[in-house]
Image (cartoon, rainbow, N blue to C red):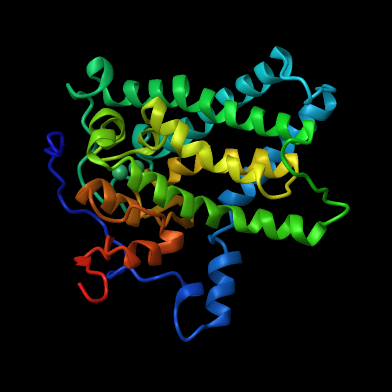
Amino acid sequence: MNQHRTEAAPSGWTPELPLRVPPPLEWPLRPMRILRYLFGFPGVYLPWAAFYALLAAGLWKLLLATGADLTVLSVRWVGMLLGCNLVIAACFYSAWHFWLYRRRAQGIAYKYNASWPREDGTHFLFGRPLASNVFWSLSSGVPVWTAYLCLTLWAQARGIAPTTSWSDSPVYCTVLMLALPFFHAVHFYFGHRMIHWAPLYNSVHYLHHANINPGPWSGLAMHPVEHAVYFSGALLLWLVPATPLHALYFTTLVALAPAEGHCGFGKVVIGETRLTTDNFYHYLHHKYFRVNFGDSLLIPIDRFFGTFHDGIRRVPRRGD
Ligand SMILES: [Zn+2]
Ligand SMILES: [Zn+2]
């Protein structure tokens, strides 16, 4: 089960340890810290979630401009979204990879693992980790992403999934947009734990964990069954009233967030700007394997189940 975990991991940069629960879950509450955490730059929403929302708005405008009839699953608009998603994913993941790994714009500054990922590996498709990761991301990840998106848009248009509108419920729609990253964090934890069950791990999730020293393209490199689980959070929008923009935003966020989440750097340096990535939490999952199943947004889920690793040691559940 753990046979691929052989790549050396010379220690590189680490954030301030031990990792702590995010400000909204600290006690006593510190309102300014919470506001900075949520709405600061960088924060939960800026810049990336806002960027994903802008992409979603662009896709929605495109659907409207082309007069797509969402009540019918036609090749025309489904194919258009598949093409757009392919271009978006290829450009977004390539940009992260180019800056950090191809151009090596900041060398190993803020890199968790001081060595660069190997360029060959027999346990990867084609024997090439990067080619394998790109292949699984684009040939399986993007179609599964698009399938969940199109089915959700279709279900909303047909009245199968409940809908609302920004003009009728602006506050509700805004709160739902802000809540979706947290919902994704909850869904990710339980889906991720499920595929760590040995039979599923050995047949499905092993593929993602072939990446011991991950880079951006490792993020969406998953087995098709894992993609089906990973994107299934979109089914929430079949249960709660939402708009097409929520569906476009949620699926874009789920599809693109793994680039940052697996980039392997704690900060991205662009000119004078140092953009904190907040992904050391998931890096520890790739390093230690049976810890930190969730997202750093909601560390308490891992704490509750005794799977939290604070960067120094695994933190047992209270009473363990
Ligand atoms: Zn895992
Ligand atoms: Zn991962």
Residue 128 horizontal/vertical position (percent): 26, 21
**In front of the other: 219 or 307:** 307
Extreme-right residue of the structure? 167
Quarter where residue 122 is shown: top left
Q: Up-down: is 99 above or below 12? A: above
Q: Quadrant of the C terminus?
A: bottom left
**In front of the other: 316 or 19:** 316
Left/right placement of residue 82 relative to residue 186 reads right
Residue 223 horizontal/vertical position (percent): 36, 27
Residue 151 horizontal/vertical position (percent): 65, 29
State the residue at coordinates (15%, 49%): 10
Quarter where residue 304 is shown: bottom left
Extreme-bottom residue of the structure? 28
State the residue at coordinates (31%, 30%): 204
Quarter where residue 156 is shown: top right
Residue 190 horizontal/vertical position (percent): 40, 50
Q: Up-down: is 76 above or below 144? A: above
Question: For ligand 1, which image quadrant applies?
Answer: top left
Left/right placement of residue 160 relative to residue 201 reads right
**Number of disc labels:** 0
Q: Quadrant of the N terminus?
A: top left
**Residue 94 appears in the picture as rendered:** yes
State the residue at coordinates (53%, 68%): 37
